[in-house]
Image (tube, rainbow, N blue to C red):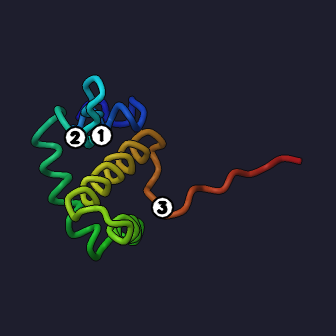
Amino acid sequence: MPELGRVDREEIAALTGVAPYDDQSGKREGERRIAGGRARVRRALFNAALPASQRWNETLVELYDRLTAKGKSHKAALIACVRKLIIFANTVVKRQTPWTKSAPQQNSCA
């Protein structure tokens, strides 16, 4: 994805196809759904997020567990992990620094 690191998190999620879109028409309100984007990238991230959200990435494991405890389905929680994973990648490329679990501390000058 040549846009990685150049756009904000909402745009990168939409380009990947994991951004939730409203399904509304008139008075009818439907569930939010993911749509569009790049299918190959979305599939690759889905396959990466599955083991990461179950075992390997503490942040994604916590997110997955929190969402499933709130009653979200497996697929909805996994798509949220995919979105978080692409946001992580976008931030790492934008900042040109390795990913860390916690945000870097800012030096304050008093």
Q: Which residue is mark 3?
A: 100
| Along the viewing direction, whichever of 75 and 38 lies nearer the viewer | 75
What type is the residue that disc 2 sits on? Ile
Please give left or right for residue 108 compared with residue 10 in the image. right
Mark 3–mark 2 CB contact (< 8 Å): no
Q: Which residue is mark 1?
A: 20
Near mark 3 (Cα within 10 A), the count class, few <14, some 14-19 or many ≥20, is few
What type is the residue that disc 1 sits on? Pro
At a point 42% along the width and 33% down the height, the residue shown is 8
What type is the residue that disc 3 sits on? Thr
Residue 6: x percent and y percent? 39, 30
Q: Residue furthest right?
A: 110
Near mark 1 (Cα within 10 A), the count class, few <14, some 14-19 or many ≥20, is some
Residue 7: x percent and y percent? 39, 30
Q: Residue furthest bottom?
A: 55
Mark 2 or 1 closer to N-term? Answer: 1
Distance of label 2 from label 1 (alpha carbons): 5 Å
Q: Which mark is residue 40?
A: none
Mark 3 or 2 closer to N-term? Answer: 2
Please give left or right for residue 92 compared with residue 71 in the image. right
Mark 2–mark 1 CB contact (< 8 Å): yes
Element under disc 1:
strand
Near mark 2 (Cα within 10 A), the count class, few <14, some 14-19 or many ≥20, is some
| Along the viewing direction, whichever of 100 and 82 lies nearer the viewer | 82
Q: Which mark is residue 34?
A: 2
| Along the viewing direction, whichever of 108 and 38 lies nearer the viewer | 38
At a point 30% along the width and 62% down the height, the residue shown is 72
Mark 1–mark 3 CB contact (< 8 Å): no
Distance of label 3 from label 2 (alpha carbons): 28 Å
